Image: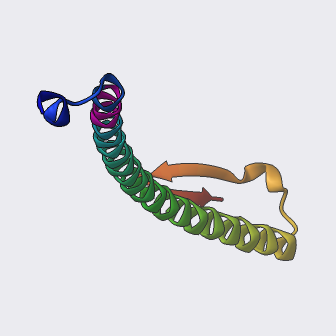
Amino acid sequence: MERKYRKSSSELFTFGLEQQVNKMRHELHQHRNYLEQNVAMKTEHLMRRIEVLETCNAALCNKLASSQAALENCSSRLAESGESASRIRLVRTGSALQVID
């Protein structure tokens, strides 16, 4: 009758394996959550950096376009007057460039 209630060694071994598997599943779940949070945080950080860089790029493109327009305007005025282009110089005023004849 005692034997009826005792677990066999194979049942104990199986029970131990189940506990180890469950522990590993829990650890994997924790690692997966950590990695997902880490990826989300880094993605958000990179998206903010991209936004800042795109804003800076747009501002620099606008400054370049205005400088090119000023140079073209000055060149056309010089061509009309017959003067030499060697008198043109760019002067930095604040964050913009000005063409000085």
Residue 41 lies in the magenta-colored region: no
Quadrant (top left, top right, bottom left, bottom right) of the C terminus: bottom right
| Residue visible at 71% across and 54% down in the picture | 88
Near-viewer residue (53 or 29): 29
Q: Position of residue 61 (x, y in %)?
A: 60, 64
Q: Is residue 20 above or below residue 41?
A: above
Q: Is residue 13 above or below residue 41?
A: above
Q: Is residue 17 magenta?
A: yes
**Nearer-the-camera pick, 47 or 13:** 13
Numbered disc total: 0
Picture coordinates of residue 31, whole percent (x, y): 34, 39
Tell me where the magenta segment starts and ends, as one range.
Answer: 13-20
- Relative to residue 79, is residue 42 drawn left or right? left
**Quadrant of the image containing the N terminus:** top left
> Which residue is drawn at the image coordinates 44% and 51% (left, top)?
46
Choose between 44 and 19: the one closer to the eye: 19
Left or right placement of residue 55 versus residue 29 in this view: right
Where in the figure is residue 47, as x and y percent of width and height?
Answer: 44, 59
| Residue found farthest to the top | 9
Apparent side of residue 7 relative to residue 64 in the rendered image (left or right):
left
Where is 28 relative to 64, above or below? above
Q: What residue is shown at x 68% (from left), y 72% (from top)?
A: 69
> Colour mode?
rainbow
Outermost residue to the front: 1
Q: Quadrant of the rendered structure where residue 66 is?
A: bottom right
- Residue ID at (33%, 25%): 13
Q: Which quadrant of the view contains residue 98?
A: bottom right
Magenta segment's dominant SS is helix
Q: Nearer the viewer, residue 2 or 28?
A: 2
